Amino acid sequence: MNFRSQIDTRWREAQSLLCVGLDPDPNRLPMHLRQQPEAVLRFCVEIVDATADLACAFKPQIAYFHAARAEDQLEALIAHIHTRHPGVPVILDAKRGDIGATAEQYAREAFERYRADALTVNPYMGFDSIAPYLAYPDRGLIVLCRTSNPGGSDLQNLELANGRRLYEHVAELVAGPWNLHGQNALVVGATFPEELARVRQIVGDLPLLVPGIGAQGGDIDATLRAGATCAGGLMINSSRAILYASDGEDFAEAARRVASATRTAIQLSRQACA
């Protein structure tokens, strides 16, 4: 099953647009885990097992694992998700953006070593930075478009000679000539609902990974109105609010409560916006 089929199935079967981000900061792990072997893995596995039925996808951020010298734990985590929770896709958030032979190695790392179902990538170097990943047509390619950070406007909102904004041009390319195998998706932040609506207008039913809910100020209702489709259309990411709902031994139970409340809020908003 390819990534697009996976996420379509997950939206339908789990009735969830919630993507659970896995950003394990060793300094924020529960105290009882910090000195344990493979603490990062143990923390993430408990979060995954507590929230898998509520999630449309999991999104480990590779930098946290690299910084903690926990690459092997990332491999084990993704293997655990595939084994214990088959059908829940794993998006490796790495934002790769190189070209040629280097990009080929990044593709091997993401899809062969880590066995991710999808990867975030940066399109700044053009189609050359996308092409090597197309050798894996069953995997998803999630391209940065209109990101949630304030500084994204420095480049993404620039007006081109044809009157289009740069992010609109990226959306057109990713949904059109770059989408050779129907595997593409886009990153569009919840903090810019008008731009999110514009991207949805351009790309039709292409899946959108949406960061920016919660700590960054994105609004669930505005996000659903701007970007949801009949099938789902959105992977609304929440990381810190779920991961660090408690710093005690009940951290997994607390994570589940927050994930459940977030999923319910999305469901209610989706009904209100239907």
Image: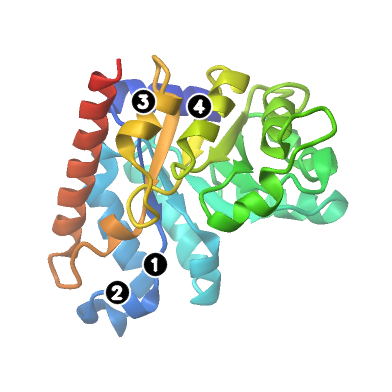
Q: Which residue carries the number 1 mark? A: 24
Residue 37 in picture, x, y percent from top left: 35, 79
Do tag 1 and tag 2 residues touch (Cβ < 8 Å)?
yes
Side of 9 where 153 appears, left or right: right
Q: Which mark is residue 197?
A: 4
Q: Mark 2 or mark 4, which has the lower sequence index?
A: 2
Q: Residues within 10 Å of mark 2 (few under 14, many from 20)?
A: many
Residue 108 in picture, x, y percent from top left: 70, 50
Q: Which residue carries the number 3 mark? A: 11
The part of the image, by quadrant, that contains residue 229 is top left
Q: Is residue 266 above or below residue 149?
A: above
| x 25%, y 50%: residue | 49
Side of 40 where 250 appears, left or right: left
Kindly identify the amino acid type of the residue bearing the numbered disc 4.
Ala
| x 53%, y 18%: residue | 205
Q: Mark 1 or mark 2, which has the lower sequence index?
A: 1
From the viewer's side, name the closer residue of 227 and 114: 227
Residue 225 in picture, x, y percent from top left: 38, 25
Q: Which residue carries the number 2 mark? A: 29
From the viewer's side, name the closer residue of 230 and 251: 230
Do tag 3 and tag 1 residues touch (Cβ < 8 Å)?
no
Kindly identify the amino acid type of the residue bearing the numbered disc 3.
Trp
Kindly identify the amino acid type of the residue bearing the numbered disc 1.
Pro
